[in-house]
Amino acid sequence: MTPAAPAVSWIQVPPQRGCVLCRYGAFDNTGERTCTCPDAGLPAPTPVVLVRDARGACGPDARFLDFPGLYS
């Protein structure tokens, strides 16, 4: 008997979903998602793919993630 294939979920979570919710998330004039977090030490709005990189200021664990209701 062969094992069943895993079910495909209908729920699709976009990459860096936390950045979509974060109060520091923004879009630049080309539509690319950027981060404007002052605590991350960014000199200017920076592309989210760089900020959330393993060596980025926020990292893959979204260290500076903040949105209304997160801590209440």
Image: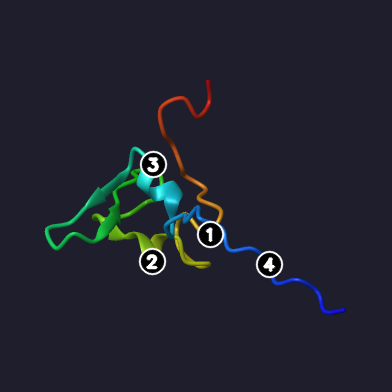
Residue depth check, mark 2 versus mark 4: number of the one nearer the observer = 4
Q: Where on the picture, by quarter, is residue 28?
A: bottom left
Label located before the other in sequence (2 or 4): 4
Q: Position of residue 7 (x, y in %)?
A: 64, 63
Residue in view at x 40 percent, y 43 percent: 39
Are there few (<14), some (14-19), or many (20+) residues within 10 Å of tag 2? some
Going by the image, does 1 lie left or right of 62?
right
Query: How far is the residue under mark 1 from the one under mark 3?
Result: 15 Å
Kind of residue at badge 1 = Pro
How far across and down, in percent of the image, does residue 71 sit?
53, 26
Above or below, 34 against 25 in this view is below
**Labelled pair 2, 4 in contact (Cβ < 8 Å):** no
Q: Badge 3: few (under 14), some or many (20 or more) residues near its Cα, within 10 Å? A: few
Residue receiving disc 4? 6
Q: Position of residue 43 (x, y in %)?
A: 27, 55
Q: Amino acid at mark 3?
A: Leu
The Cα atoms of the two marked residues, 4 and 3, are separated by 29 Å
Q: CA distance from mark 1 to mark 4?
A: 26 Å
Q: Nearer the viewer, residue 38 or 16?
A: 16
Counting residues from the N terminus, which is met first, the one under dot 1 or under dot 4? 4
- Amino acid type, callout 2: Leu
Q: Quadrant of residue 57?
A: bottom left
Q: Which residue is mark 2?
A: 50
User: Would you call the spot at circle 4 few (<14 residues within 10 Å), some (14-19), or many (20 or more)?
Assistant: few
Q: Nearer the viewer, mark 2 or mark 3?
A: 3
- Separation of disc 1 and disc 2 at Cα? 10 Å
Q: Earlier in the sequence, mark 2 or mark 3?
A: 3
- For the residue labelled by badge 4, is the local secondary structure a helix, a strand or a loop? loop
Badge 3 is on which residue? 21
**Mark on residue 60?**
1
Label 2's element? helix
